[in-house]
């Protein structure tokens, strides 16, 4: 009875702080009841949903339950797998590597043709295009996890083959990471993206490209480097999604402070996904590029260098930002290659052709 009373008090008043569950959707407050809402039973459903998601000590109970499943039976959430050395993998990227979401030769050829058209239109305007392929953890740690049989060509294979004999500037981080002899993890054990350190190296390499094509005068560099065995930020995003009590495994990680000496900073339009956000948090976007540079997140939302500044996203602002950019950078992870650019290619071609 005492515990039930504590749960009720915690549910109603939240006297004790609790750490929210990772990956869980926000639960809105229940709207004031009305006779119509009660008659339609929508108010009752809202109350039931709120109580289910917000009962006292729910977060602790779920973490204890998940910890029991993980510790006793090795069971974790359905979209994550654990390999050797407690390295976590997101299953969707295995499916992409194995060709499960392959769109076929004809469809990828049309995307390659669109890339070539976009590159030509940008060149006519004195602008540049760079494609960045983010790494796939399943490829990088392929010796640490059992992989399903690869029985189909992947979209990654098709993109590489389609761009092979073209002049398109392509930075394949998947291949590049394999060539590096890094003393620090380029992809953390507990995260799904490139590590914070890996993101810094990628950003530095992109900046070198900008110097080579005359858009910048000096690449930025790492001024300080703090090593750590415990993951931070996005380096632990998969572990956090497990919602368990135990800490993530020790790792060989590094957290850099960057110095941006370049005075000539290009205006950049980035079309990117969650991988690019790590570089955003490293201030690469805000200090390495012109302050008016924008991130077009999944081709759905325009993000200013200052995240607090809201930007309306419509045909007019899209065309304005596209035409103002010195270079357009499209960053994509392997799973997203089936929808490369998230519609940006056709949108940009239409805007530049008007």
Image (cartoon, helix red, strand yellow):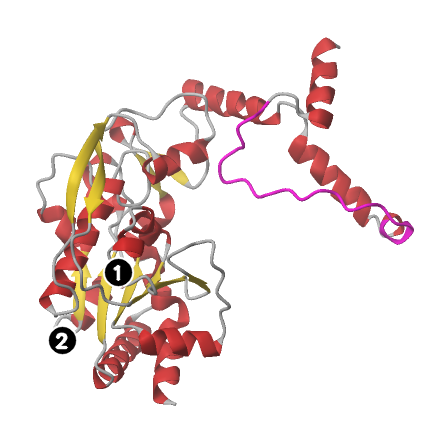
Range of residues picked out in magenta? 17-37
Q: Is residue 335 depicted above or below 148 in this figure?
A: below
| Residue 139 x %, y % | 22, 47
State which mark lies toward you, 2 or 1: 1
| Residue 194 x %, y % | 26, 45
Q: Is residue 37 left or right of residue 341?
A: right
* Quadrant in the picture for residue 76: top left
* Quadrant in the picture for residue 101: bottom left
Determine if the magenta segment contains residue 19: yes
Mark sitting earlier along the chain (2/1): 2
Comparing 170 with 104, the one in front is 170
Label 1: few (<14), some (14–19) or many (≥20) C-alpha neighbours in 10 Å: many
Quadrant where the C terminus sits is bottom left
Residue 289: image tag: 1
Q: Find disc 2 in the rendering and name its residue.
A: 167
| Residue 253 x %, y % | 22, 32
Give the residue furthest to the front.
Answer: 263
Mark 1 secondary-structure assignment: loop
């Amino acid at each position: 009875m005492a515990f039930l009373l504590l749960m009720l008090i915690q549910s109603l008043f939240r006297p004790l702080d609790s750490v929210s569950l990772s990956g869980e959707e926000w639960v809105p407050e229940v709207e004031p009841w009305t006779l119509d809402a009660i008659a339609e039973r929508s108010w009752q459903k809202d109350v039931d949903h709120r109580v289910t998601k917000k009962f006292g000590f729910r977060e602790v109970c779920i973490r204890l339950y998940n910890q029991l499943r993980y510790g006793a039976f090795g069971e974790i959430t359905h979209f994550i797998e654990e390999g050797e050395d407690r390295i976590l993998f997101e299953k969707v990227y295995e499916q992409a590597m194995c060709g499960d979401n392959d769109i076929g030769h004809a469809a990828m050829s049309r995307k390659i043709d669109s890339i070539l058209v976009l590159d030509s239109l940008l060149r006519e305007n004195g602008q540049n295009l760079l494609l960045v392929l983010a790494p796939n953890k399943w490829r990088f740690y392929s010796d640490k996890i059992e992989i399903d049989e690869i029985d189909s060509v992947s979209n990654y294979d098709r993109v590489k083959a389609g761009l092979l004999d073209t002049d398109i500037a392509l930075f394949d981080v998947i291949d590049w990471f394999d060539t590096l002899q890094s003393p620090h993890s380029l992809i953390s054990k507990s995260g799904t993206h490139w590590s914070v350190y890996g993101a810094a190296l990628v950003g530095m390499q992109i900046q070198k490209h900008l110097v080579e094509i005359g858009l910048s005068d000096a690449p930025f560099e790492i001024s300080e480097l703090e090593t750590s065995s415990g993951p931070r930020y996005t380096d632990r995003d998969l572990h956090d999604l497990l919602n368990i009590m135990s800490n993530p495994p020790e790792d060989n990680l590094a957290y850099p402070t960057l110095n941006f000496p370049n005075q000539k900073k290009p205006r950049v339009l980035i079309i990117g996904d969650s991988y690019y956000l790590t570089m955003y948090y490293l201030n690469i976007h805000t200090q390495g590029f012109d302050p008016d540079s924008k991130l077009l997140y999944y081709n759905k939302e325009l993000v200013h260098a200052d995240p607090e500044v809201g930007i309306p996203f419509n045909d007019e602002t899209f065309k304005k930002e596209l035409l103002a950019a010195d270079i357009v950078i499209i960053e994509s992870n392997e799973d997203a290659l089936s929808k490369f650019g998230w519609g940006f290619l056709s949108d940009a071609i239409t805007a530049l052709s008007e």
